[in-house]
Image (cartoon, grey):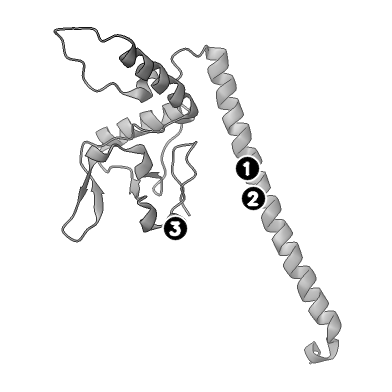
Amino acid sequence: MPSCAIPTCKNVVGLQKKKDGITFHVFPADEKRKTEWTKIIQRARLEEFWKPSKRSVVCSMHFDDKYFYETKRGFRRLRKGAFPNKHLAMATTASELCIETSKNASPVQSNSEIGDVNISDLDYIFDTPKKAKLRSQLRSKKLICKTHVRRIKTLQQKNKRLVKKERIFKKCPNEFEK
């Protein structure tokens, strides 16, 4: 089952219920928007060569509510200009805190109006190249560890089933001989 492409997100298609209000959205068919989404997720994953597969999805947790609309039949859809901009990485929370405290500190009067600040552009801005590389290596090692743990679990389950079958065969060997 596909899971959300954002690395820190644990939402998986099929496990999340509609009652939770979580929906999953495939990457746009339009190449320009697809490239935008890909760049945002590459930054969040710290993997500059990451590319989405045909089944890659992003859950609704990563979009502002303003990007959604409901169809006549009650389906929740993304608007055309939508892009993921919420809960992108662990470092996002620190940058969000910095922005919030600076907003609350002292309002500055300005003639120019500031547009939407894209938090994902501010991610890892203070990281040195070495720190960014280490962060990327850590993420890849965690992913490898996670796949190994899954593999171990499946092998243990397989082993458990085989032991159970063996016990059944040992209890009544005459029934299976023909």
Q: Is residue 90 left or right of residue 141?
A: left
Alpha carbon separation for disc pair 2 and 1: 6 Å
Amino acid type of the residue that numbered disc 2 sits on in the rendered structure: Arg
Alpha carbon separation for disc pair 1 and 3: 20 Å
Q: Secondary structure at mark 2?
A: helix
Mark number displayed over residue 134:
none
Sequence-wise first label, 1 or 3: 3
Q: Is residue 12 left or right of residue 169?
A: left
Q: Residues within 10 Å of mark 3 (few under 14, many from 20)?
A: few
Specify the quadrant that holds the C terminus: bottom right
Asked whether 168 or 67 is in front, the reply is 67
Please report the residue visible at 76 percent of the width from the left and 75 percent of the height from the top. 165
Q: Position of residue 5 (x, y in %)?
A: 44, 40
Residue furthest to the left in view is 111
| Residue at the spot of label 1 | 146
Q: Position of residue 85 (x, y in %)?
A: 33, 31
| Residue at the spot of label 2 | 150
Asked whether 178 or 39 is in front, the reply is 39
Sequence-wise first label, 2 or 3: 3
| Residue at the spot of label 3 | 14
Q: Residues within 10 Å of mark 2 (few under 14, many from 20)?
A: few
Amino acid type of the residue that numbered disc 3 sits on in the rendered structure: Gly
**How many discs appear?**
3
Image quarter of residue 39: top left
Please report the residue visible at 81 percent of the width from the left and 75 percent of the height from the top. 166
Amino acid type of the residue that numbered disc 1 sits on in the rendered structure: Lys
Q: Position of residue 169 (x, y in %)?
A: 81, 81
Q: Is residue 16 above or below residue 60?
A: below
Q: Position of residue 173 (x, y in %)?
A: 84, 86
Q: Are marks 2 and 1 in contact (CB under 8 Å)?
A: yes
Q: Is residue 156 above or below residue 176?
A: above
Q: Residues within 10 Å of mark 1 (few under 14, many from 20)?
A: few
